[in-house]
Image (cartoon, rainbow, N blue to C red):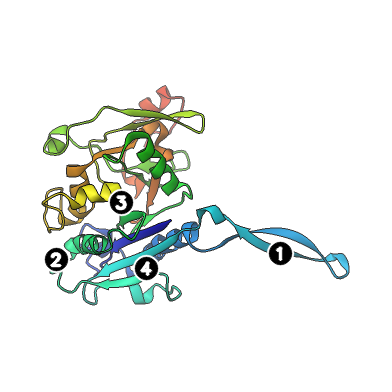
Amino acid sequence: MKILVTIPHYYKYDPQVNYGSSREREAGRIEVVRKTVLALRRLFSLPGAYSTAQEGEHGWEDRYFLYHPANTSFHYEVDIVICTRGKDHLLEKLDLPAGMFLQGVSDGVEDPMALGFACHQVLQSCFGEYDFYCYMEDDLVLHDGFFFQKLLWFEKQFGDACLLQPLRYQLGKREEFFKTYNDFELEETLMSEFRPTPAPLKAEYLGREISFIKSSNPHSGCFFLTPAQYERLLCAPSYGTVRQGFVTLLESAASLDISENLAVYKPSYENGAFLEIEHVGGYPADEFRVDTEEFRQQGYELKEV
């Protein structure tokens, strides 16, 4: 399987700006971007290994461990293109081996918030060459080796007019409340101009029923499209144009076209871990208040905050 991942990346420190690409200190942002790239490589293209204990020349006293290939059925051909503008980026400071990614220079982009649309141009120019066409903001980290297999399964179950988006989660410091899905739900009136709300979907996966809902917030900061799904975007007259129709240009690049041309689903919150992606550059999860009574009704005891 061949996968193309495009990532818009911009960095220029300005603590007054409400985005991680500017408000975060340089060292922290370097680590965030490294995690994004390394996770893709470690999960899907770099070799994994398992070990066996081997008896040495003088018996088990000088034993050694021999590595063998692992996860070979999840070894994909992954191309990563990071789109930048001018010198406002951190790619030269990532300390990654050569060949881990390609840099797409987009100096013609005046507004750095529009870099995501430069990623769309890369995807469009490569149509017909890949099995997945992907877009990720530069602070998202995958941890699920079955991620793309689940997307293929979902398309087979419900058709290429439906798109499954991962839930973005962030990690907090509270031991009893560790992971939160912070892409908050939006008022339905804000989404009424997009596709009508589809009915919930359900299907059995590994012997367990999994449900999917049309979230009122389609944004996940990313998308992962099969050729059939991406072709639906390409056929739309507005695709390929820089336009703001969902929050800012940044969010529009990730979510506007898919919202207009596909029925966007996410896992229901009761089985949210089915498809998720870590958001390492967002607001700390600890900044949100907790409805402790609702947790008690589900059998969890949380401390008042």
Q: Are marks 4 and 1 in contact (CB under 8 Å)?
A: no
Which residue carries the number 3 mark?
A: 227
Alpha-carbon span between mark 4 and mark 3: 32 Å
Alpha-carbon span between mark 2 and mark 3: 29 Å
Residue 85 on image: x %, y %: 21, 72
Foreground pick, 136 / 226: 226
Residue 111 on image: x %, y %: 14, 66
Residue 146 on image: x %, y %: 47, 47
**Numbered disc in front, either 1 or 2:** 1
Residue 271 in the image: above or below residue 146: above
Residue 200 in the image: above or below residue 163: above
Q: Are marks 4 and 3 in contact (CB under 8 Å)?
A: no
Q: Residues within 10 Å of mark 3 (few under 14, many from 20)?
A: some
Residue positioned 32% across, 66% down in the render: 81
Lower position in the chain sequence, tag 1 or tag 3:
1
Which residue carries the number 2 mark?
A: 111
Q: Residues within 10 Å of mark 4 (few under 14, many from 20)?
A: some
Q: Residues within 10 Å of mark 2 (few under 14, many from 20)?
A: few
Q: Callout 1: helix, strand or loop?
A: strand
Residue 222 on image: x %, y %: 30, 52
Q: Is residue 240 left or right of residue 210?
A: left
Quadrant in which the N terminus appears: bottom left
Q: Amino acid at mark 1?
A: Leu
Which residue carries the number 4 mark?
A: 30
Which residue carries the number 1 mark?
A: 66
Q: Is residue 291 left or right of residue 59?
A: left
Q: Can the viewer see residue 295 in this picture?
A: yes
Lower position in the chain sequence, tag 4 or tag 3:
4
